Amino acid sequence: MNWPLSVLLLSLLKSTGTNQSTPSGMTLAQALSVAERTSPILLEAKAEADAAKFGARSAKVGMSPKVSVHAFGSSSQNGSIMSSTPGVDPSALMLVPSGGFLDGNLSVMIPILAPRLRAMSRQASYQINSADAELAEVHADVVFQVTEAFSKAVMGRQVVAAEAAKVTAAEELVRTSRDLFDVGKGIEATVQRSQAELSRSKRSLMEAENEAKKAVLDLLALIGSDLASEVLPVGDNSSIGTIAPLASLISWAEISRPRIASEKAKLETASWDVSAAKGQLSPQLYGSLMGDITDRKDMGGVTAGLVMSIPIFDGGQLRAEVSKAESMRTKARATLKVAELSVEKEVRQAWLDSQTADASIQSSETAVQAAKTALGVMTIRVQAGKSILLEQLDAIEALREARADLAKAHFDSTMARAKLVRAVGRGL
């Protein structure tokens, strides 16, 4: 080998060794903390909530005085009327004389009697409450999804451990069967069968490792983290603590669940929308103040006044809007009832799942201990020539299945509690 080529190979080997990184541990609390900052779902929901709240605040200031400044400049042969630019409130109309004319105008409009604006202002407060509750609902969804993704990643690691234990048992089986064959107490077919089982176990281990890595990718994507990160979920999906009685959980959900709070706020919004629609049928009274500075001595000065408007006949348009608003209020009341029933059903189903999951953990733990004992007995019997290899292989597989079932039972228990927290809207 020439010198430059050997140096290149050594440098490649060195760089390969240094680029290997150890996965960093991540707890569920850390995953949730990252999701709070970078989850795309949560960031989108926060932006939508902010937009809704800013829109509501613009309506909330409807009862406030409005002030605008206008400037007019004209050259007219016979005089005319000029209006202020669109989109500026309050607007102004100016009667301009013939000849050249310059005017600076200050306009003030103050709502005095405005039932529609007052109702819309109150309505905006509940729109803000609804936006906050909807954001809290999305936040709870994200917490649940992160918990589920994290728990799946932990379960994947536990399944990998079960498969790895089976590989270890298969390697030991190959060794003992070969030793027995070497001393004339076994046959070559037993060795070949053991080696075939070892190959199958290694293939299952690789498949489990692949699924575990994909579960970590799902978690990283959900929390908005770098998908190239090397992360090792730390935890065992253990459920700690007791669960409150079902009746208490349902009562808590009625108070704490953001979905119900959002629908209640929407019902209040719809009620004030009815008031706003009815307010259009009532008299409107505004105070007006205008001040002008012009280049004409005979024009300008300050003008103050009151403006009242009373709808007399509009062909039934305003009353139709009232009927529409009342229908929407009825719909909002029905939607709230649907939400209350749906939330109660979620609580009851999650509570039942939690009871089943806890019982499943106990039975699965018993099954693992029984499978370990059975494998130990069967190994001794096979080595003594009192049982066949197939029985030992069945015992190894039974232990792997029992460990996998235990990991699934812990996952189900964790998710049952997470669903219960999600349904109730608070801790248990």
Image: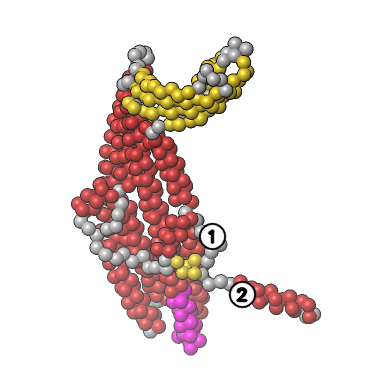
Query: Residue at label 2?
Result: 18
Labels 1 and 2: the sequence-earlier one = 2
* Tag 1: amino acid: Asp
Q: Residue at x 40, y 83 (%)?
A: 383
The C terminus lies in quadrant: bottom left
Residue that label 1 marks: 226
How many labels, in total?
A: 2
Could you tell me if residue 175 is visible in this image? yes
The residue drawn where x is 48% and y is 61% is 216
Residue 176: say if magenta: yes
Measured as percent of width and height from the top left, residue 299 is found at: 52, 19
Q: Residues within 10 Å of mark 1 (few under 14, many from 20)?
A: few
Q: Secondary structure at mark 2?
A: helix
Q: Is residue 233 magenta?
A: no
Q: Which residues are magenta?
A: 167-186
Give the answer, above or below, for where 170 lies relative to 58.
below
Is residue 182 or residue 35 the one in the foreground? 35
Name the residue rendered at 44%, 48% in the picture: 46
* Residue lying at the far front of the rendered structure: 297
Question: Closer to the camera, 139 or 180?
Answer: 139
Residue 315 vs 334, above or below: the answer is: above
Q: Dot 2 surroundings within 10 Å: few (below 14), some, or many (20 or more)? A: few
**In the picture, residue 156 is in which quadrant?**
bottom left
Disc 2 residue type (three-letter): Thr
The image position of residue 303, as x and y in percent, is 43, 22
